[in-house]
Image (cartoon, rainbow, N blue to C red):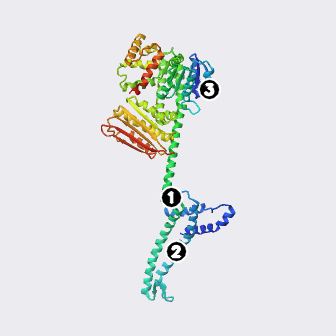
Amino acid sequence: MVANALTGVRALGLLLNWPVWAMRHHRRRPAVGPLVERQSQVDTMVLGPLETERTTPAREVLWLVFQAVLGPAVLGLSMVMWAIALFSVSTPLWWRLGPPAVVFVPVRDTTSSVIAALYGLILLLLAAACSHGLPRWHARVGRTLLEGPHRSRLTRRIATLTASRTGVLEVQAAELRRIERDLHDGAQARLVSTGMLLGLLDMRLRELPDDRKLLREARAEIGAALRELRDVVRGVYPPILADRGLAGGIESLAERAGAALTGVAVTVDVPGRLPVALESTVYFVVAEALTNVTKHSGANRAEITVRSDRERVRVEVLDDGRGGADELRGTGIAGLRRRVAAFDGSLSLVSPVGGPTTLRAELPCVS
Amino acid sequence: MRVVIAEDLLLLREGLKRLLAELGCTVVAAVDHPDALLEALDQERADVAIVDIRLPPTYRDEGLRAAIEARRRRPGAPILILSQYIEQTYVRELLADSDGGVGYLLKDRVSEVTEFLAALETVAAGGTVLDPDVIGRLVNRLTGADTLAELTPREREVLKLMARGLSNAAIGTELSITERAVCKYINRIFSKLGLPPTDSANRRVLAVLHYLDDGDRRG
């Protein structure tokens, strides 16, 4: 409370000095920063740690006035209360010494002095309660003045989190692309080059059948390593997405799914390009859905639709299979749900026994 | 054989140069940019160009686009595309002009030196060579859809090898059968699929590929 009052005095000083300050430094508002910093330390002691938010000049001035008036006032009020309370409680000790006094009740004898002391006791409790509660109230009001009401603080917090999450996802997508490129230019190229050298050696060693057998094994190993790397890269960031964007990626998925189906209809209506992270999420949703269609549904045909406006991307994969898909069996759909949830999107699977099965995902177009 | 190489990674460009020299080819130009490739193809009398799909400036499919552009300028200009990935979309775009003299192989295949050289020669001679992966995928797709169900497993084997651009003799060696037996299989495949018989190896490949490629759209 003393700290609050000190802040108040400083705030008053700042306010009074404002015109002088403005003339001297050609600045329109006083330097509130250090004081806010100081006071927020005090508030944190009372309210516990809270994230600080950016404030506005108007709020800072309002806050200064509040501190200047309420800081000393609250301290004053509290001191007066304690003084009166102590004075009243001690009435039985001194009433005989001085002239007749009025402490809540006229004090003339021992009985009335005890009644006054009882009143004092109540006041004492009240003062204690104030000493405990007023600084909290002070801190809370101060914070609200500085940062806006709790609700709008939450709204801003959500906006910050959304933005930072988008940032994280973009960074992650960029990382994936980098890994894909590093593998392509690094390990994959090196393996191809080693394969070439071994091929040459093989050609020269035609007359030495025993050594050639070892060579063939070595080359088979390299072939296997390259195949594995290709699968890894496809899982990390499908190269076709980088080359041809979402439409090209979905077309290529549909072509691959064609192995087990008689027809796959594709509609991709996405103006411009989506953020990279969103594109690969949509791609993996369709990929997983098609895997389920070809592996489990017994479907003949599938329909893929991807549409987006400024607000949302909608993905739908429909098949004419036997239905009855249960997302609790197998981890594919659960994994997709997590991926989609990371974008604040939703995913639904409708699959009555007998079919048809529809998988829908809807994702906001964060940018 | 005079060869132009377009590959942005130094390691692979140098490796290919060395390999081709060893195989008795002359590398007339080794470039790392699609523009330089088009320029080299304009200026050098190259028998074939080996082109990586990913080239600068964006490292997407510039190599493929440059190849298509080169073939637009000079129809049938032989080009063998190399890539770390096989994409059906790219196969279709590459085969779109039906002029022959194209190939699309995974980079891994280069280590099979003799087969690689054979593929290069086929493309240079106006033939078509596709990676076994491409054919495998096309054939599997149609087998799943029952379109190729009439073929026996052996005929399917022959079809795959034929679609890859192998000659009758090469198919015979691969399957350990005589060339005449290969001919018989091929005639039977063509009549089962209702394709017109043809003697030109290249037209034969294209006919089969287009048949396979159209498969999923026919449904």
Pinpoint residue A328: horizontal percent, then vertical percent. 35, 42
- The chain ID associated with circle 1 is A
Q: Are marks 2 and 1 on the same chain?
A: yes
The disc label shown at residue B36, or none: 3
- The chain ID associated with circle 2 is A
Residue in the image at 44% along x and 88% along y: A109
SS at mark 1 in the image: loop
- The chain ID associated with circle 3 is B
Pinpoint residue B198: horizontal percent, then vertical percent. 44, 14
Confirm whether residue A137 shows in the render. yes
Q: CA distance from mark 2 to mark 1?
A: 28 Å
User: Label 3: how many residues lie within 10 Å, few (<14), some (14-19) or many (20+)?
Assistant: some
Residue A115 in which image quadrant: bottom left
SS at mark 2 in the image: helix
Residue in the image at 37% along x and 39% along y: A358
Q: Which residue is mark 2?
A: A77
Q: Amino acid at mark 3?
A: Ala
Confirm whether residue B87 shows in the render. no
